[in-house]
């Protein structure tokens, strides 16, 4: 059954998508076992699976990093990516979907469509990735195929085309009826392969009814099937299979299968469906790229100019591994390629077929392949590698904006430099992590997609790099502002210590800026009492004074300063003297003003299911948020509010718990607002 693959038509690049604990990794593990790639079944709870090879994945029992494996079935090579199911790692799913041709969406037979399975389904919709559905855990108490399919129809809105009927229920689940070929597949205890036979007598009427419903659903959506159905009032197995393939690849239908991956039941039919219904690289549209404003097409042809997209980088201490999807052309070991994103040449040191944490060397990779290469120095996730003589840039995967931040610092001073380089390596591997240094607080701030995301990143620093770090809430950059101003503040700057002295007198008015923000300066001096060059020096000195306010040393904003008068000396006045007078004079004036503290606020846009709006509005109010808008679209509510930035720490986790993981939010800076309570 397994054979060496040489044709593009015999390649399937697919991902496994699902909510946490729906069984993605177990499905992947059983696929590897069924195809003979592994010779022992790995278990998530034992930490022995192939794709969850990272120590944190094994400790936590969840998939954190997308892992690529390759196997063969029925003459086809299957390049498979097991993706994370936790919402914090949605960016890993996004990068994987960008390079895949198809996907298997796994659903829990008891829970049906869960929040994150809904999210990854929408991601696949955006990328136009054809899918088949596998309803897993049919052996669990409460498992029901019809209920799970109904939730798929209601929550995800595809047309489910159920091609199997379960034999037995819950603990008694032993097999399925194949409605396309009208045969029974039964897995007896201790048997690794299904036994094919006739449909059981007690299920025959139900199987005939469901086959009829399947034929009608297919005929409604497929012209050739409709023609045969009208002529013969039934569909042959060949016509039905061909129509299911067409509907899957166009997205007009989703084939639904069922089974229990943990008990090794339903995996072989799933593999047959992958080969029969999901597209090869030849069946998907050619990719388009741009270069110097011109669009270029690249077909999946090994003889075409080389073009590949880097979608994942593993910057380990032992070497830099770059994962590529080859869209066109052929690449050989030792070849020179053009990194069109960084605009530099790179050399391919080695080409590897990846089996999670193990690799097998290859001499070349062809269009349609997913491989890893060693030797690239500049390529990042999203970089395009191409033939130097035919450059183009492919559209990179989108990167989500981070929503949660923590402050990190090395516990030992000697680790400070290592921490900076290790953080750079982390962001190289995972573009959804962002590292920045707050210019005002001096903190190193690490931002990501959720608290678990950041927890995993920090633990990786400790485990992989051996750096002990302190983690805390980032400090909010406060501002001070003028609440009530003063006028007529006279400051005399006179200094004489031999030689040329310094002489400058300034008279300042300070008032709140009102609706204006920042700092405004103007001169009301008449009669040339202060020359224009000295006026500019006074303004520069006032700006210097804004760096530290009188309350707690925070920067000052939201004020207007007017230079109303001044005096000069024919010899001792200078720009330096007037700049000093401006700085010290404004500091003295600010001490005489009534000052207040401002805190940064952000505009938050929260998208939640309509039924969760009440709880979300209450939570925003508790966070001192002011709701500015609310709209409902197709059962989804969008709430806009202005919230103090300090109140958003931990909000991502809180929102997900209130909305069963279905709520999302984005933020953008909205300036500053008065902070409550006394100034810190």
Image (cartoon, helix red, strand yellow):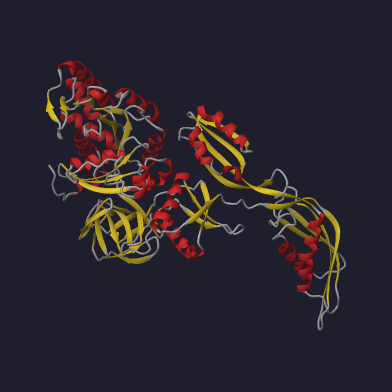
- Which residue is at 43% across, 53% downward? 431
Whether residue 618 is situated above or below residue 350 in the rendered picture: above
**32 or 409: nearer the viewer:** 409
Please give the name of the residue rendered at 77% of the width and 55% of the height, measured from the top-left corner. 560
Quadrant for residue 531, please give it.
Answer: bottom right
Left or right of 383 in this view: 370: left
> Which quarter of the picture shows residue 263?
top left
Residue placed most toward the observer, 639 or 44: 44
- Count of numbered circles on the image: 0
**Residue 545 visible, this angle:** yes
Left or right of 546, for residue 391: left
- Quadrant in which the N terminus appears: top left
Quarter of the image where one finds residue 601: top right
Tell me if residue 276 comes above or below residue 420 in the rendering: above
354 relative position to 3: left or right: right
Asked whether, in this view, residue 213 is left or right of residue 562, the answer is: left
From the top left corner, tell me how far across and down residue 478 is, in percent.
66, 52
Q: Is residue 597 above or below residue 362?
A: above
Q: Position of residue 507 (x, y in %)?
A: 85, 63
Instruction: Please tell me which residue lies in front, 397 or 549.
Output: 549
- Measured from the top left, where is residue 152 in percent x and y? 35, 28
């Amino acid at each position: 059954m397994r054979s060496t693959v040489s044709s593009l038509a015999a390649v399937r690049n697919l991902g496994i998508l699902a909510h946490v604990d729906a069984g993605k990794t177990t499905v992947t593990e059983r696929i590897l076992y069924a195809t003979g790639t592994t010779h022992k079944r790995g278990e998530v709870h034992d930490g022995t699976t192939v794709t969850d090879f990272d120590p944190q994945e094994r400790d936590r029992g969840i998939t954190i990093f997308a892992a690529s494996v390759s196997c063969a079935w029925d003459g086809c090579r299957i390049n498979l990516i097991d993706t994370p199911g936790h919402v914090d790692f949605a960016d890993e799913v996004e990068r994987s979907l960008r390079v895949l041709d198809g996907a298997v969406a796994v659903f829990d037979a008891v829970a049906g469509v869960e929040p994150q399975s809904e999210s990854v389904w929408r991601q696949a919709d955006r990328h136009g990735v054809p899918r088949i559905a596998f309803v897993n855990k049919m052996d669990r108490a409460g498992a029901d195929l019809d209920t799970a399919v109904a939730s798929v129809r209601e929550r995800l809105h595809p047309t489910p085309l159920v091609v199997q009927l379960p034999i037995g229920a819950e603990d008694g689940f032993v097999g399925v009826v194949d409605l396309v070929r009208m045969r029974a597949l039964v897995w007896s205890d201790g048997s690794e392969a299904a036994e094919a036979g006739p449909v059981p007598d007690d299920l025959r009427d139900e199987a005939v009814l469901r086959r009829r419903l399947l034929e009608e659903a297919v005929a409604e959506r497929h012209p050739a099937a409709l023609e045969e159905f009208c002529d013969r009032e039934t569909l042959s197995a060949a016509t039905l299979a061909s129509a299911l393939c067409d509907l899957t690849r166009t997205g007009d239908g989703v084939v639904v299968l069922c089974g229990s991956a943990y008990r090794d039941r339903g995996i072989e039919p799933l593999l047959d469906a992958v080969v029969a219904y999901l597209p090869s690289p030849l069946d998907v549209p050619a990719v388009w790229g741009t270069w110097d404003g011109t669009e270029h097409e690249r077909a999946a042809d090994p003889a075409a100019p080389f073009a590949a997209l880097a979608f994942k980088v593993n910057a380990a201490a032992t070497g830099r591994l770059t994962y590529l999807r080859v869209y066109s052309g052929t690449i050989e070991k030792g070849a020179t390629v053009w990194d069109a994103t960084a605009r530099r040449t790179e050399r391919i040191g080695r080409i590897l077929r990846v089996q999670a944490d193990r690799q097998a060397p290859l001499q070349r990779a062809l269009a349609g392949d997913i491989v890893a290469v060693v030797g690239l120095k500049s390529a990042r996730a999203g970089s395009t590698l191409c033939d130097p003589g035919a450059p183009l840039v492919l559209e990179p995967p989108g990167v989500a904006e981070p929503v949660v931040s923590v402050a990190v610092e090395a516990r030992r001073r000697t680790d400070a430099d290592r921490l900076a380089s290790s953080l750079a390596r982390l962001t190289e591997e995972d573009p959804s992590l962002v590292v920045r240094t707050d210019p005002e607080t001096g903190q190193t701030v690490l931002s990501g997609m959720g608290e678990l995301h950041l927890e995993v990143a920090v633990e990786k620093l400790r485990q992989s790099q051996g750096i002990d770090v302190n983690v805390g809430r980032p400090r909010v950059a406060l501002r001070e502002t003028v609440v009530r101003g003063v006028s007529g503040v006279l400051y005399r700057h006179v200094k004489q210590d031999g030689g040329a002295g310094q002489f400058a007198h300034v008279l300042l008015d300070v008032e709140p800026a009102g609706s204006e923000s920042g700092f405004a300066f103007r001169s009301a001096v008449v009669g040339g009492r202060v020359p224009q060059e000295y006026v500019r020096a006074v303004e520069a000195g006032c700006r210097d004074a804004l760096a530290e306010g009188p309350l707690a040393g925070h920067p000052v904003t939201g004020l207007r300063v007017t230079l109303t008068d001044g005096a000069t000396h024919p010899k001792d006045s200078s720009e330096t003297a007037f700049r000093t007078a401006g700085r010290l004079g404004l500091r003295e004036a600010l001490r005489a003003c009534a000052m207040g503290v401002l805190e940064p606020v952000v505009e938050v846009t929260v998208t939640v299911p309509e039924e969760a709006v009440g709880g979300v509005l209450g939570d925003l109010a508790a966070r001192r948020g002011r709701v500015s808008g609310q709209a409902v679209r197709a059962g989804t509510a969008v709430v806009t509010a202005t919230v103090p930035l300090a109140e958003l720490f931990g909000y991502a986790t809180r929102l997900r718990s209130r909305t069963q993981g279905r709520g999302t939010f984005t933020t953008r800076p909205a300036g500053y607002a008065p902070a409550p309570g006394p100034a810190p």
